[in-house]
């Protein structure tokens, strides 16, 4: 067993859960687990699987800690999503909550490219965005108003540590003049509990599979405000306009298509209420990816960062009730 760089607990996990046999050859290859987790592809005779472990201290420049119990939250979200949209998530295989490990099916990149890689390469497909909106809306609808899920995912502390504090509150500290507006968004989001939120619906966590998008990395899963997921994903499509200006029109059309597909499933509350929350969160999240604890790595020049600050500050000062004016302001501001 080739496991020289892997802790014994991870190796034992596969043995005790019956995913590997004693003496069986295996090869562990580290994958990009992002800033918050270790992730391995484990090749066994005739099969490959993924093993994931949450980190206590995240791999960012800022001092950012989060409870490793989020590994169990992600596993629970994966089980929920697999029941409702089995083709849009990896297959959950086994979980060890004490070790903070779980295993899931491995999806080969040649058939499941990362959506972010496609977008950064200038490949923008409207049907992928529609698929993401469709899956997200269906999962939110399946969870809305479910008291059992609300109890299981009462993960307020984790969501605060991974999302509200490093994104919105850290941004408020960098922009004291916006602290009131951002603080109100934090309070509103924290008290809104309507559906099961993924918490990290980002193109880096979405595979463009042959049968539709596959969602990964639900470490932030929380029973809360579904508008957060919608705004979080739209935010990434907008930011990509600054690195691929030649496909700005396609990116904005994809954002519109994603929202349209998503809203087709909203029946647990008035669409106007959910859209208003998403429209006010979106500029806050734009600003957070420049001045929060987790800035996007591809905006490394001052000019695009300043543009984000200018647009986000304006929109936070004059909040929109729908997404249309937010997208219009962004369209007018970004270079093409």
Image (cartoon, rainbow, N blue to C red):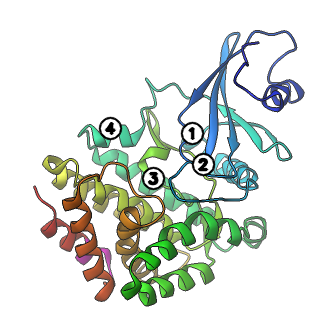
- Mark 1–mark 3 distance (CA, rounded to whole Å): 14 Å
Which of the 4 image quarters holds residue 325? bottom left
Element at badge 4? Answer: helix
Q: Is residue 290 above or below residue 326?
A: above
Residue 274: x percent and y percent?
A: 46, 78
Q: Secondary structure at mark 2?
A: loop
**Looking at the picture, how far across and down is residue 120, in whole percent?**
29, 42
On screen, residue 169 versus residue 19, left or right, reads left
Verify CB contact (< 8 Å) between mark 1 and mark 2. Answer: yes
Marked residue nearer the N-terminal end (2 or 4):
2
Name the residue that disc number 4 marks.
118
Q: Is residue 264 visible?
A: no
Mark 3–mark 4 Cα distance, whole angstroms, equals: 13 Å
Q: Main secondary structure of the magenta part?
A: helix
Q: At 35% from the left edge and 67% from the top edge, which residue is drawn?
A: 286
Which residue is the site of mark 3?
A: 202
Instruction: Of the two numbered discs 2 and 3 on the same chain, state the one appearing first in sequence.
Output: 2
**Which is more foreground, mark 4 or mark 1?**
1
Mark 2 or mark 3: which is in front? 2
Instruction: Give the residue number, with chain letter if any, for mark 2.
Output: 36
Number of residues whose C-alpha sits closer than 10 Å to that of mark 2, classed few (under 14), some (14–19) or many (20 or more): many
Crowd tier of the residue under label 4, counting other residues whose Cα lies within 10 Å: few below 14, some 14–19, many 20 or above = some
Residue 165 visible in the shown view: yes
Left or right relative to 44: residue 180:
left
Residue 285: image quadrant is bottom left
For marks 2 and 3, give the CA distance.
14 Å
Label 1 residue SS: loop
The residue labelled by disc 1 is 33
Quadrant in the picture for residue 331: bottom left
Give the magenta range. 321-326
């Amino acid at each position: 067993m080739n496991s020289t760089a892997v802790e014994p607990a991870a190796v034992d996990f596969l043995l005790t859960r019956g995913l590997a046999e004693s003496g069986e050859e295996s090869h562990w290859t580290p994958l990009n687990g992002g800033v918050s987790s270790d992730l391995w592809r484990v090749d066994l005779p005739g099969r490959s699987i993924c093993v994931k472990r949450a980190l206590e201290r995240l791999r960012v420049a800022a001092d950012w800690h989060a409870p490793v119990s989020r590994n169990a939250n992600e596993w629970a979200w994966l089980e929920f999503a697999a029941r409702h949209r089995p083709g849009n998530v990896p297959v959950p295989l086994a979980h060890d909550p004490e070790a903070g490990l779980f295993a899931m099916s491995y999806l080969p990149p040649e058939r499941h490219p990362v959506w972010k890689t496609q977008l950064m390469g200038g490949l923008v497909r409207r049907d992928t965005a529609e698929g993401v909106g469709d899956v997200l809306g269906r999962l939110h609808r399946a969870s809305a108003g479910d008291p059992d899920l609300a109890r299981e995912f009462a993960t307020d502390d984790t969501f605060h540590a991974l999302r509200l504090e490093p994104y919105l509150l850290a941004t408020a500290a960098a922009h004291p003049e916006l602290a009131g507006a951002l603080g109100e968004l934090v309070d509103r989001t924290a008290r809104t509990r309507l559906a099961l939120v993924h918490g990290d619906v980002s193109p880096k966590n979405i595979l463009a599979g042959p049968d539709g998008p596959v969602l990964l990395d639900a470490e932030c899963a929380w029973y809360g405000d579904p508008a957060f997921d919608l705004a979080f994903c739209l935010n990434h499509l907008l930011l990509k306009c600054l690195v691929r200006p030649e496909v700005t029109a396609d990116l904005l059309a994809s954002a519109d298509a994603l929202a349209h597909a998503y809203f087709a499933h909203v029946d647990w509350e008035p669409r106007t209420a959910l859209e208003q929350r998403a429209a006010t969160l979106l500029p806050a999240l734009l600003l957070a990816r420049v001045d929060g604890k987790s800035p996007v790595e591809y905006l490394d020049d001052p000019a695009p960062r300043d543009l984000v600050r200018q647009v986000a500050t304006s929109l936070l000062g004059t909040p929109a009730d729908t997404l249309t004016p937010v997208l219009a302001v962004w369209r007018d501001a970004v270079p093409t």
